[in-house]
Amino acid sequence: MLRLLSIRNFAVIETLEVEFDKGFTVLTGETGAGKSILLDALSLLLGDRFEPRQLRPGADRAEIAAEFDIGDLVPVHEWLAQNELDNGGALLLRRVLDAQGKSRAYVNGSPATLAQLETLGERLIDLHGQHAHQSLGRSETQRTLLDAYGGSAMLAREVGAAWRAWREARALRENATRNAAATVREREALVRGLAEITALGATAAEWDALSQAQSRLANAATLLETAAAGEAELADGDAAITSRLATMATRLAAAAAHDKSLEKTAALIDEARIRVDEASRSLRGYRERLDLDPVELARVEARLSAIHDVARKHRVRPEELPVLLEDTQAKLTALSEQADVDALIRAESNLQRAFGALADELTAKRKVAAAHLGNRVSAMMKKLAMSGGRIEIALKPLDEPASSGRENVEILVATHPKQPLAPLARVASGGELSRLGLAIQVALAEVADVPTLVFDEVDTGIGGAVAATVGRMLQQLGSRRQVLCVTHLPQVAACADHHDLVAKHGKTAGVAAKLVRLDTAARVEELARMLGGREITAKTRAHAKELLEQQRAR
């Protein structure tokens, strides 16, 4: 459940910290005081998009944070563990927003994405906005509500995935049948290319070795001349480097007998003589091994030419031929699978059966949920001054299966006993639609596993005894879940376990919002304001006190 909401520099709120308790809490206040802004801030914290205009005027950045008690919420703990964000205690969410429209999000102090906030938010809070009922006329919304009520949301997603896999398999089969001749031609070309590259048998290592051999054999005469000249300079004749170093080493050794500091230099000269002698012998060995073989040179160049020709034909570099061989083999394998129409037909059939099994299961669950939800909402309609009205949730088979299953979901309603059932959007008036939306939302909330429910003026358009009924409905929900509700109806506010007042303070240039938890006396005053407006009389105050006492006596 939500424990704490902290807001800085958001809309008219400069600084605000709100603590929430279990049960049913209402937030009231005059129009423009900032009641719904609290819920807007909470929505941003749970992944909604931020607009710079929401920043408090004159502020560089806004910050919203919340603490949640998630003690026994297994789905939340599992998600946090999977995303390596679990700290073993309370859940802390934080979002920072700046004037450039950029934002940063954090979960338990670690950076997070908006998608992660949204996914996590779905497990923490179910927010029903004041205009949520306006989407009830859409078939997609009605289907989503029914699946949520019946616990079939995950199954519905699986049906959608199965349908897409089946359609993809059908497209592959149709494409293979339609392009069979072109596929045969492409396959034949690949087979020829594969045979040519395989017959060549070139490897990347062979290409490197041949290139080096060709360079060596083509320049053998120059290499021999260079090696001979080097050997002569190092070892042949009295002027050879080895002879001169030997002479110098001998003279330095003799001089070292008179000055031992020369011994190190003499040793270095002698070491240099030894190294030069080794270089001379190495050049002699190289010259003896180097072969002026025109036949071998011709063979190497012919092989290089053959590799060049094949590489040029296939428009790759010679050293890339082995990779081309692997790619060609892979393409042939894939093409063979695509060209195997019988295999594609079998795959399509298997996926169609898989979709059918899931879709049949979803249809069965929807039938049960439709009957149960229809009865549940019809019963609530009587409590909401729509006696004799009823709701029926119809499942209309589709001509062709779709990603949503085998049927459309349509809510049919009759608001009076003698009125025939008709689509929801065409029958209900604005006020009736609002009440029907609330009834459906309450029914859904009773079966959902989200710990906190937030209602933002969903009681708009109702009053009197109906408002009292709405208040009691929310109060009953509060006995099992944490319920927060922004309301303008005193009948609803009187039913709450806790009452928070949102008020403006400060002058026009620096208006800010504050929130106060009301005690019994303050609740009476606020209920009196809600009943009678700015002029609170003894009569409205007495009425407010009576209203509060009536709800406490229930």
Image (cartoon, helix red, strand yellow):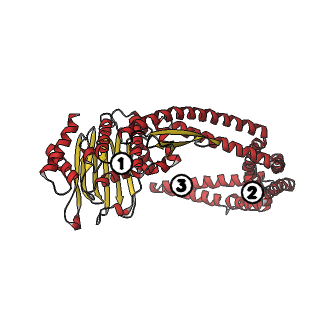
**Residue 268 disc label:** 3
Of the residues shown, which amino acid type is indicated by label 1?
Val
First-in-chain label (2 vs 1): 2
Quadrant of the rendering where the N terminus is positioned: top left
- Mark 3 vs mark 2, CA separation in Å: 54 Å
Splitting the image into 4 quarters, where does residue 547 fall?
A: top left
First-in-chain label (3 vs 2): 3
**Residue 316 disc label:** 2
Q: Are marks 3 and 2 in contact (CB under 8 Å)?
A: no
Please, what secondary structure does the residue beneath circle 3 have? Answer: helix
Rendered position, 395 above or below 59: above
Residue 239 pos. (x, y %)? 67, 63
How many tags in the picture?
3
Please, what secondary structure does the residue beneath circle 2 have? Answer: loop
Quadrant of the rendering where the C terminus is positioned: top left
Residue 309 pos. (x, y %)? 82, 57
Q: Nearer the viewer, residue 371 or 455?
A: 371
Rendered position, 227 above or below 154: below
Q: Name the residue under label 1.
A: 458
Residue 500 pos. (x, y %)? 23, 47
Of the residues shown, which amino acid type is indicated by label 2?
Val
Q: Please identify, in this view, whether the residue under mark 2 or under mark 1 is nearer the observer.
A: 1
Splitting the image into 4 quarters, where does residue 467 fall?
A: top left
Q: Nearer the viewer, residue 4 or 257?
A: 4
Rendered position, 294 above or below 399: below
Of the residues shown, which amino acid type is indicated by label 3?
Leu
Which residue is at a point 42% across and 35% down the rendered structure image?
376
Which residue sits furthest right? 295
Q: Residues within 10 Å of mark 1 (few under 14, many from 20)?
A: many
Q: Nearer the viewer, residue 375 or 222?
A: 375
